Amino acid sequence: MLLTITYEGEHTQDLGYLLHKNPGRAQQFALNYGKAYVFYPEVSDGCTTAALLLDIDPIDLARGKLGSGEGGLFDYVNDRPYAATSFMSTAIARVFGTAMSGRCDKRQALADTPLSLTARIYSLKDGGDEGLAAQLFEPLGYTVHAERRALDDAFPEWGKSPYIDLTISGKVKLSELLNHIYVLIPVFDGQKHYYISEDEIQKLLSHGEGWLAAHPCREKIARRYFAVRRSYARRALDILLKEEGEENADGAEAEGEQGEQREREEEVRSPLNAQRLRAVKDAVLSSGAASVIDMGCGECRLTSLLLSEPQIRRVTACDVSAGALEKAAQRLRLDRMPDGKRNKLTLMQASLTYRDKRFEGYDCACVVEVIEHIDPSRIPAFERSVFEFAAPRTVILTTPNREYNEKYAHMRENELRHGDHRFEWTRAEFEKWAGHVCDEFGYRCEISGIGEADEVLGAPTQMGVFTKNG
């Protein structure tokens, strides 16, 4: 991904002072996901351009992650869509951090002065939303131009690319320009490529200080910036509303607190989650399995139960998140685990939407409250990975019953149970999907409900036990 910043006017070579990067030489910066390069393709008294080129290395993305090192190229598979925008924001903060703060000892007066600046961001994904760039940047005083090309000139029927080359220009301080770009380009993608923690709230507020609270699209910006953490968006908006002194700040705060409580995976400690884990464990034991793979294990609560069962001789827990596996290792007290359990257990980083030979050879696979976190477009890949290639004798899968959401007083109409859910199935939809899997991959399925059932809406959780034919 490439970002260029052009300064036009007088003595524009001073851009090097403002960015704290010498125009006379190219510089390279090591990042934990690749390298960033800064160079100046154009330098003159009247016009100077600085370029930040981001080179993402998929090997650097995985190197040193828990569970890597034994699976060859499979260690380097990541199921997140390619979200270069969040990496570019990180690179901007890393490489131009001092410029973002507005500090420049040698040219402080220039740093405090609005300049004629033009920024170009190449290959920016907006998903085909034609008006998004203007909505985000025009209220900040920029002139906006977005160029979108055809996917392939030889095949016009394929339509337009979901990527644009974006140009914004205006009279603005360099620090303001960098902060605007830092906050807004991840909004185009609507996702981050890395784990989002509460620290991101302060990052948004810090880099949005002085302009985000008054932006007419602030709600949209916060929602898309925290696309998979709705409560974080609500908390950020609450603070912004208070900055503006708006009357509904208290209401937003209450809503944010409720959302935060829900988004802590409220069911983890609830009777429903305990019932779910017991139901899955009982189904594993009833299947006669001696080896189990817990796919999308999270903090390994199911894995912990299975390790205590004498019938189970081998348990592998896998998750795409290295952070989740590290927390799981702490929760399981891996360093103090008795040898009998430790010898049963393997922790492994892996994606469920790619074929992985390490998934093969298990009697049973458990996929507990995971499938609803997968983008619908990736479900066919998940099906093949689990049911065709891994092909265990038994697959036990649980997922929310969307119909039951009516029973939750705190939920709005059509709201999903968790901010990271991509969808939730009704009972009929789940039954239809299960039937498709059985027909396609040679399984039969028994569906049941988990939790206190409503006569009309059914149970809160639905479970499918797939058994391979023959």
Image: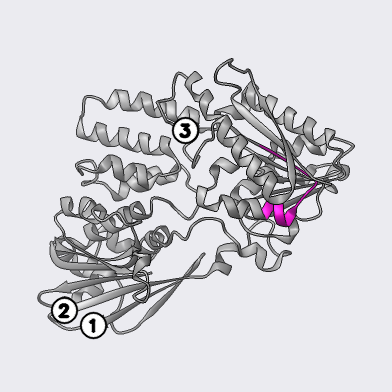
Residue in front for this viewpoint, 152 or 17: 152
Residue 27 in picture, x, y percent from top left: 38, 78
**Alpha carbon of mark 1 to alpha carbon of mark 2: how far?**
7 Å
Residue highlighted by disc 3:
416
Q: Is mark 1 on a helix, strand or loop?
A: strand
Q: Which of marks 1 and 3 is in front?
A: 3
The answer to whether the residues at label 1 and label 2 have Cβ atoms under 8 Å apart is yes
Residue in front for this viewpoint, 159 or 423: 159
Residue in front for this viewpoint, 194 or 77: 77
Q: Which of marks 2 and 3 is in front?
A: 3
- Determine if residue 458 is in view: yes
The answer to whether the residues at label 2 and label 3 have Cβ atoms under 8 Å apart is no
The answer to whether the residues at label 1 and label 3 have Cβ atoms under 8 Å apart is no
Residue highlighted by disc 2:
47
What's under tag 1, amino acid-wise?
Glu
The image quadrant that residue 199 belongs to is top left
Q: Does the magenta stretch include residue 352?
A: no
**Alpha carbon of mark 1 to alpha carbon of mark 3: how far?**
50 Å
What's under tag 3, amino acid-wise?
Leu
* Colour scheme in use: one colour
Crowding near the residue tagged with mark 2, few <14, some 14–19, many ≥20 C-alpha atoms within 10 Å? some
What's under tag 2, amino acid-wise?
Cys
Q: Does the magenta stretch include residue 396?
A: yes
Task: Tell which circle, 2 or 3, labels the residue nearer the N-terminal end.
Answer: 2
Residue 189 in picture, x, y percent from top left: 38, 54
Crowding near the residue tagged with mark 1, few <14, some 14–19, many ≥20 C-alpha atoms within 10 Å? few
Residue highlighted by disc 1:
42
**Alpha carbon of mark 2 to alpha carbon of mark 3: how far?**
51 Å
Q: What element carries label 3?
A: loop
Residue 205 in picture, x, y percent from top left: 32, 44
